[in-house]
Image (tube, rainbow, N blue to C red):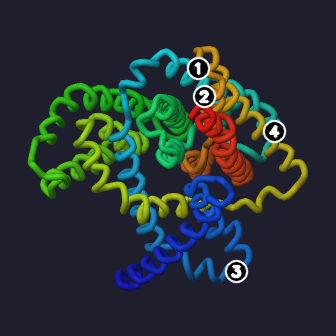
Amino acid sequence: MPAETAIQFFLQLAVILLACRLAGLFAQRLGQPPVIGEMIAGVVLGPSLLGRLWPEVQDALFPPGPTNVVLYTTAQIGLVLYMFVIGLNFDVDHIRQRAGTAAAVSAAGTLAPLALGAIAAVPLLNHGGYFGADVSPAMAMLFLGASIAITAFPMLARIIFEKGLSGTTLGSLALACGATTDAISWCILAVVLAAHGGTPATAVVAIVGGLAYAVVLLTAGRRVLRRLDRPSGQETIGAPVLSTVLILLMACAWITDTIGIYAIFGAFVLGVAMPSGHFARRLTDRIEPLTTALLLPLFFVYSGLNTEIGLVNTPTLWAVTLGLLVVAIAGKGVACAAAARLSKVPAREAVALGALMNARGLIELILLNIGLEAGIITPTLFTMLVLVAIVTTLMASPIFEAAYGRGRVASG
């Protein structure tokens, strides 16, 4: 059995990497970043397309069982490594300079979608078929609000990286706002899960533990981690230091996952706490290439394998989906852009920031999968919100380029 699992996993890797490569090239030709192609590749390889056209091929490639567990675990490792790299290149000084703007945009990107999502949940509750039978109105309103408030943090980070905005004011501001709104959304999810089937201690541990983790690591932890940056005369990070960093990274991912905050935040905060400058650049050079080329695509594809778009099959369901899309755009993209503009951010940067914050990607799919498995939402609402995630993510890059990309060319 282990040998058969390994053989199947290698075949999956080959198919996934080929599909992501081709989809990434196609996305680039359409003016989208390659990461969008990787997201679409996951949907294509899943039951939404391949499983519908050639179900026997899809079942042969991705049978349920041990191989999917291996695929999921490997994908999580890639995601953790990538978010650590993003944290390494996160410039805290930009946020210190624009802390007021970051706070205003984060507040707008959290409160507006929570309010609009709560309002949108009321008619869905009245008609039935969207939430679980034992879900209270308060739980439904909180969950839908959190799902609309979520930002595709890894995707946002990768778009920023691919656009060359890492370390810039706009890039750092977007990452800070995305991290803040997502952290709040995961805390809300912890509260909903605790109320639905857990205990109040679940939510308390997630919120208090997450805050304690960040505070300790960014204060005392930062001072301890400086010892890693010792002059060695080498242009690359040595094996002992790299091994130490990877041990710390996996331990931090485990801690945040255990307390109920997603592992990517443990990785990101550790990256921020690491010594900056030359050390961070050398560490990035060691970790980033293999992570983005081999491991990260598995995360996007695995999530797509669990998505079934064909459930939205009536005019009424499509009308509800369109309504949720409008609510999502207004509550996130428009609200964040307006808050940034009120904070005296230039108009084109405000629109670009709103576009980036409005992308939800597969982080929302993770949240939705948790809600589906817990019985909070039905497969129908799950599919609708998946479509919202895909559309808002596809919107991000064209709007960003129209508002900010061309402005940079003109000003250059």
Mark 1 → mark 2, Cα distance in angstroms: 6 Å
Q: State yes or no: discs 4 and 3 in contact (Cβ < 8 Å).
A: no
Q: SS at mark 2?
A: helix
| Marks 4, 2: nearer the viewer | 2
Give the labeled residue for mark 1: 345
Q: Position of residue 59 (x, y in %)?
A: 60, 79
| Marks 4, 1: nearer the viewer | 1
Which mark is drawn over residue 129? none
Which of 316/335 is in front?
335
**Kind of residue at disc 1:** Val
- Residue for point 17% across, 29% down: 223
Give the labeled residue for mark 4: 323
Give the labeled residue for mark 2: 349
Looking at the figure, which quarter contains the N terminus? bottom left
**Kind of residue at disc 3:** Trp
Q: Where is residue 153 in the image (x, y as percent from the top left)?
A: 51, 42
The earlier-in-sequence mark between 4 and 3 is 3
Q: SS at mark 1?
A: loop
Mark 1 → mark 3, Cα distance in angstroms: 50 Å
The earlier-in-sequence mark between 4 and 1 is 4
Looking at the figure, which quarter contains the C terminus? top right
Which mark is drawn over residue 54? 3
Q: In the visual, does 405 lie left or right of 300?
A: right
The earlier-in-sequence mark between 3 and 2 is 3
Judge whether residue 24 can be spotted in this image. yes
Mark 4 → mark 2, Cα distance in angstroms: 27 Å
**Kind of residue at disc 4:** Gly
Q: State yes or no: discs 1 and 3 in contact (Cβ < 8 Å).
A: no
The earlier-in-sequence mark between 4 and 2 is 4
**Kind of residue at disc 2:** Glu
- Residue for point 38% across, 80% down: 6
